[in-house]
Amino acid sequence: MEWFDRVASELQEQLESICEDYDKSGHLSINRASKHPRIEFFVESDNDERQYFFNLLFDPYNEEFYEENFDTVLKQPTRIILDDITDIIESVHESFHEFMEDDDADYYDLVEEYELLDSEITLEDINVEWETPEVTAFQIEDKIEVTYQFGIDNANGDGVLRRVNRIWTEDSEFFEDESNFTFKKEEGSTIIAMIASHLDKMIGFEEIINE
């Protein structure tokens, strides 16, 4: 962990020294407790909420820093290795400015969008082009089935994640619950990285059922 500690101690100061905007609003937090320790970069909104724009992860076995992205061709997460502190600073700095520029450009559109959404989004409200089939995440035959499907909202290019939960009771009753989550392109890699960093702490369906 010597390499991790050295980078963690130097990053904030170096970023502040090369970028006046980051010096004013950029922050980082360090999490050493995870299987793969990470450094999370964020800005704070007017109501003190953290808005994350970059996650830097560390593989202690290989002693290397990396960021996680999503390969749209292979349809799976990918790992981008950052060999030295210069590569790390460049990646964080670039992500910071992309986040700030997108945040400014989309602000008024987002305000209008969220003012219009006073209830949960349903597929009847949007025109989705599905990029994947319905994929089963978990299943116990004749008891429970959880599926996911990913698509693109044709109206605004948002990603749409559809979750369907199907349950069969002992009385042969059938229940189906559907929920949909939409997100912007910039949010995708952050969501993937945050989930991947915490999977080892989560409890699965089987553990709950077997209790």
Image (cartoon, rainbow, N blue to C red):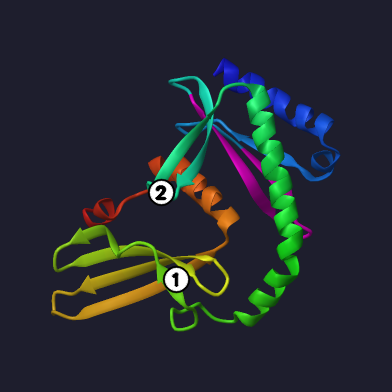
Which segment did they paint magenta? 40-59
Badge nearest the viewer, 1 or 2: 2
Picture layout, residue 206 above or below residue 180: above
Residue nearest the viewer, comparing 120 with 110: 110
Label 1 CA crowd tier, 10 Å (few <14, some 14–19, many 20+): some
The kind of residue on which mark 2 rests is Val
Q: Position of residue 178 (x, y in %)?
A: 37, 74
Picture layout, residue 142 above or below residue 13: below
The majority secondary structure of the magenta stretch comes to: strand
Label 1 element class: strand
Residue carrying label 1:
180
Residue nearest the viewer, comparing 80 with 53: 80
Residue carrying label 2:
73
Residue 161, quarter of picture: bottom left
Q: Position of residue 40 (x, y in %)?
A: 62, 40
Residue 48 forms part of the magenta stretch: yes
Residue 144, quarter of picture: bottom left
Residue 44 forms part of the magenta stretch: yes
The kind of residue on which mark 1 rests is Asn
Does residue 149 appear to the left or right of 94 in the view shown?
left
Q: Position of residue 24 (x, y in %)?
A: 84, 43
